[in-house]
Image (cartoon, rainbow, N blue to C red):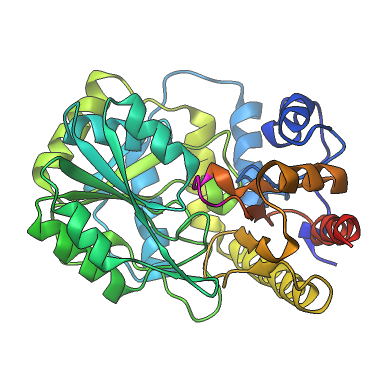
Amino acid sequence: MSMFDTAPAKTGDTFVRHNPNYLKMFYGTDQVTPFWVADMDLPIADPIKDALRYVAERGQFAYEFNSEGIFAAIAGWFDRRHGLTLKPENFVPFPGVLTAISLLIRELSDEGDSVLMQVPAYHQFGKMISSAGREAVKSSLINEGGAYKMDFEDLEAKLAAPKVKLMLLCNPHNPIGRVWTANELARVVEIAERNNVTIISDEIHADIIYGDNRFTSLSALDNQRHVSVLGSPAKTFGMQSISNGYIYTENDAILKRMKHVEDSMYLGHGNAFTTFATIAAYEKGDAWVDELLAYLQGTIDWIGSFLTDELPSVKMSPVEGTYQLWLDCSDTGLEGDALKAKLGEAGFGATPGIWFDEDATRFIRINIAAPRADVQDALRRFKKVLD
């Protein structure tokens, strides 16, 4: 039995994933096993718990900063796990990844400018762009039998538009599970460079990679124009409510500008719980992550077999990375509200595809960072209501 076979005990309704008000709003009932929020319903690593206990039990909460320790731990992790050499002095901390991206949009473009994103896309991308007074320009990924690739011709045309100043890249990509290859990324960078577009690369899922796939950070490519948003332990270690976000760039002008933003708004203070937990995760979390990846792969394998043998009307895109699975329900004949109603009837709390692309009405996303039995039961219930 794996340590991930049992979810942590629920201690109230304040966890977003399990909040009955949200479940009723989305599915018409709170009798739903939730797989809609991209966090974890799994026990976290013991070194993280030990670090949190240490901070709580020492009984002292005076001002305390250790950004050097955090950046060294992150750099060491990326060296060990991805063969990526990072300079600790080129990190800038922010309260979270969404905060970092939102500020980058504001600092690296002007109101009225455009920001390109590839769809289907993490639904907060559009909100971050519009709330900054910028216009979202969408480039649709090409779906070839469930496997997605970039539309480079479309990128060529849209990145050439004078108002497009930034591109939001997601690697690994949420929700489709692609891990973009070094060649794909090099081509994107070449197009962006030629059109004076700066890429903001959201790499928060970098550690959740399966099989022979390899994560390539934008920071690994020979460029100094762009920014990687990496170094948040949120997705890797299930630390969504206690983690910061960290940007990395070797562009001196962007680095200076973002350090000024962080310093002038006092955004790097953080707190001791986050500091100690982050260092513990990156310095002592390797074995836990290895076991997590093996467990998630087992869940993916089971889902693939179940869909093929028992529910062939639902098809899964190939999963290269993340613990978000993109399922095509087109052959069920359901879409939009009718599909969501069936999810509620089955108690299957998947995320409607329309959250990620207005045209993805026949798709759902499922977060499998949960006990495998919960995923299995939910899919069996979904099959039952579809039969």
Residue 361's spot in the image, x, y percent?
60, 50
Residue sitting at x 70%, y 41%: 337
Residue 359 drawn in magenta: yes
Answer with the quarter of the image where residue 131 lies.
Answer: top left
Of residues 242 and 378, the one drawn nearer to the viewer in this rendering: 378
Query: In the rendered image, is residue 94 in sight?
Result: no
Identify which residue is drawn at 70% across, 48% down.
350
Determine the residue located farthest toward the front in the rendered image. 333
Residue 219 at x, y percent in the picture? 25, 60
Percent of width and height locating residue 359: 51, 50
Q: Quick check: 57 left or right of 270?
A: right
Residue 151 seen in render: yes
Q: Nearer the viewer, residue 202 or 2?
A: 202
Give the answer, above or below, for where 363 lies relative to 274: below
Residue at the spot x=55%, y=52% of the render? 360
Quadrant, the C terminus:
bottom right
Position of residue 124 relative to residue 185, above or below, is: above
Main SS of the magenta segment?
loop
- Quadrant in which the N terminus appears: bottom right
Which region is colored magenta? 356-360
In the rendering, at what x and y percent does residue 199 appear?
23, 51
In the foreground, 351 or 73: 351
Residue at 62% across / 67% down in the picture?
293
Residue lying furthest bottom: 212
